[in-house]
Image: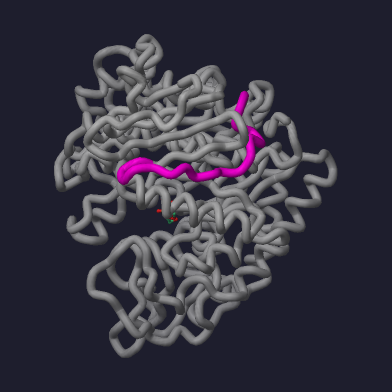
Amino acid sequence: MNAASSTAWWKEAVTYQIYVRSFADSDGDGIGDLNGIRSRLPYLRELGVDAVWLTPCYPSPQHDHGYDVADYTDIEPAYGTLHDFDQLVAEAHDSGLRVLLDIVPNHCSIEHPWFKAALAAGPGSPERERFHFRQGNGDGPPNNWRSMFGGSAWQPTGDGEWFLHLFTPEQPDWNWNHPDVAAMFEDVLRFWLDRGADGFRIDVAHGLYKHPEFPDAEDPFEEERVADAMNVLAWNRPEVHEVYRSWRRIADSYAERDGKDRPFIGEITGIAKRHLADYVQPDQLHQGFFFEMLDSPFDAEAYGTTVRRGLEQAARTQAPVTWVLGNHDTVRVATRYGGGAPGAGPGDIEAGTARARAAALLALALPGAVYIYQGEELALPEVVDLPLDRLTDPVYRRTEGRRLGRDGCRVPLPWSGTAAPYGFSTNADTWLPQPPYFAQYTAEAAQADAQSTWHLYRAALRIRHEVLTDAGPVQFLPTPPGVLAFRRGDGFTFALNTGDAPVDAPHSGTPVLASAPMPEGKLPAHAAAWWTD
Ligand code: GLC
């Protein structure tokens, strides 16, 4: 069966995450846009992915690059128009690609008309009830909650009240107890589904509701962090599940019309792992990102545990795992696995790249869905040395530079040529500067080199479609330390060597793909391979 043509196409789909600002620029302003994406659809088709997920492309003042939405039913002017969106969806569909949008229901932008109306209407007004406005506690904020991006989660309005923002002060949190909010989001979903969207990634899906009395958190932790695992008062409230039940009814009503599921994939982080399954239910979300692989070190035993946990969870929930190695919030894989990061230097990029290639073969060999963040197929490293005066991530500003933030994984993609803007744009002054070494990482160079990571991904996607869709469950093979190996069905074997010395290949079949050359049939250090019988 070809998963792409079935109702439940998302279960085994490989989705390519497009960070819209940084994918391709069609109009020379140095910022990616929808027509840029249209121009690169042949590239995605050639790579062989099944779907794309577009990060938020709605009108936004870009305080958090689109995760601060000013209008949920239009397109950011710097990215194009609704007409461009319609064209993009039509052309993507013609290329056999599905299009997932990113919905941001926890918060909006201070530029959203309902928030502007709330500020103008003043304390006690019905307009303020759509958000969380509260009187301060003496001179201070209403409680001790912290924002995910640093500092207090409350911003004073100047009229005695404060409003809640679990992210930046430019991202006020919606009050989901207000019927207008729930109704508005249902209209938004229908708006985009009617325009051809094939599903949604849900931003901070475990957010939305807060403790109704806003008590102080027991641990108002000193150090800001990205995952506020502590503050159970602000996240993962039971009421949120009712929202997803009603959204699922909407998605299912579209699927009933034409037999094509419209999946919801939740970004659920920082809460106890056992709670993920509460969201991924037949009457709620189709899937939730399984971030444990992204958090795993490059280590066979750690991967083994992660894969087992993912598969167990899938068996419990009936929802296939979504394997993730990278995204727009995380240090790029090649740098992470090479021991580098912003502030810590580039690390050992050669080793990191070898490991990233091996890890990609692991993710793509597993049952379930896989998400590829743009540039992973080029083995793009994190840009760890962006000039500080060019950093744009609010995390940098809100933590007063203690955390450098996520700009380094969001640098515009290098497509071709030997100098900036590397075919990304006609304007070398891209919104984040591209480093000179991007010349080695262009898509053009990768496509011309049969050994490149691009060709590895492409071959893996092709073979995955041919032999791994519905290939059967994972059966782990006994292996020496540092090696992870499994069979799927009767005809496929996977092995990964995270140790420092070559090992005997665990299978005598035909090697069909390897992340590194395999002299004398041995699996080298930091490499993975696929065999068919
Ligand atoms: C999610 C997004 C991240 C954004 C945050 C606030 O975690 O992935 O990029 O900053 O939500 O919307």
Which residue is rendered at x = 28% and y = 46% of the image? Answer: 392
Q: Quadrant of residue 358?
A: top left
Residue at position x 67%, y 27% in the image: 93
Q: What x and y, as percent, mark residue 67? A: 45, 51
Range of residues picked out in magenta:
466-483
Residue 382's place in the image compared with 414, above or below, is: below
> What secondary structure is the stretch in magenta mostly built from?
loop
**Residue 170 placement, left or right of 406:** right
Q: Quadrant of ligand 1?
A: bottom left
Position of residue 136 relative to residue 364, above or below, is below
What residue is drawn where x is 56% and y is 59%? 105
**Quadrant assignment, res 415:** top left
Q: Position of residue 79 (x, y in %)?
A: 49, 34
Q: How is the image coloured?
A: one colour
Q: Nearer the viewer, residue 392 or 276?
A: 276
Quick one: 154 or 417, which is closer to the camera?
417
User: Does 81 lie within the magenta span?
Assistant: no
Above or below, 236 relative to 532: below
**Horizontal relation, residue 239 to residue 231: left or right:** right
Compared with 167, 385 (above or below) is above
Q: Residue at x 52, y 57 (%)?
A: 112
469 drawn magenta: yes
Please indicate, yes or no, whether residue 381 appears anywhere in the rendered image: no
Quarter that holds the N terminus: top right
- Which image quarter holds the C terminus? top right
From the top left corner, tell me how far across and down residue 480 is, in percent. 34, 43
- Which of 482 and 73 lies nearest the eye of the viewer? 482
Residue 213 in view (yes/no): yes
